[in-house]
Image (spheres, rainbow, N blue to C red):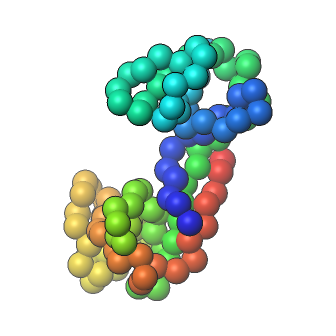
Amino acid sequence: MSVRHGYVADWRGEEYEASPDGDDVRLYRARPADGFEEVTAERYVRVVPVGEVTRLAYVSTRCTWRGEPFAVLGEHDDWLRVEYAGGRAAVAERLGLESFDRGVYQAWAPRGEVTGLVEKAV
C-alpha cells in the first residue's frame, strides 16, 4: 500500500494531488498535459475553480505500531515516518519517540513492524 497524506481532488474523471486556495484548487501531476504548467521536474500544476472539482478531500494513512495508533506522514524505502496519534506524552516517551514539537511525537518505523495500514478521507 502506498502512503498518502494530503489533499486530493477529482476533476474531469481523474484524481489529482491537490491544494485548495480560496475559490480555486491547484491540481498536480507528474507528467505534462494540456493546461498544466511545469513547476519543477516531474511536477505540473493547473489551477481550476473549486466549482469544477467533483470531490475535494483530505487523505491520511493510519496504522498501529508497537500497539499504539499513528498517522503515517511519509515513506522511504522500507521505512515509514509516523506520528503518534494517542495523545499521551508518557506513552510517546516510553516508546522513545522524537519530540518534533510540543505534543507532537514522530519516528521512523520499519514497515514490517507496522500493522493495520488504512487510508481515510475526510
Q: Quadrant of the N terminus?
A: bottom right
List x then y, in percent, for residue 37: 47, 16
Please tell me which residue is depicted at 65% across the width and 51% down the height of the picture.
121
Q: Is residue 83 above or below residue 48?
A: below
Q: Nearer the viewer, residue 92 or 3?
A: 3
Left-right relation of 17 to 51: left
List x then y, in percent, for residue 82: 38, 65
Left-right relation of 20 to 110: right
Within the image, what quadrant is residue 58 found in?
Answer: top right
Specify whether residue 53 is in view.
Answer: yes
Q: Is residue 92 above or below residue 16?
A: below
Please tell me which residue is depicted at 31% across the width and 64% down the height of the picture.
106
List x then y, in percent, for residue 36: 54, 18
Q: Is residue 44 above or below residue 114?
A: above
Please tell me which residue is depicted at 49% across the width and 50% down the height of the picture.
5
List x then y, in percent, for residue 9: 65, 34
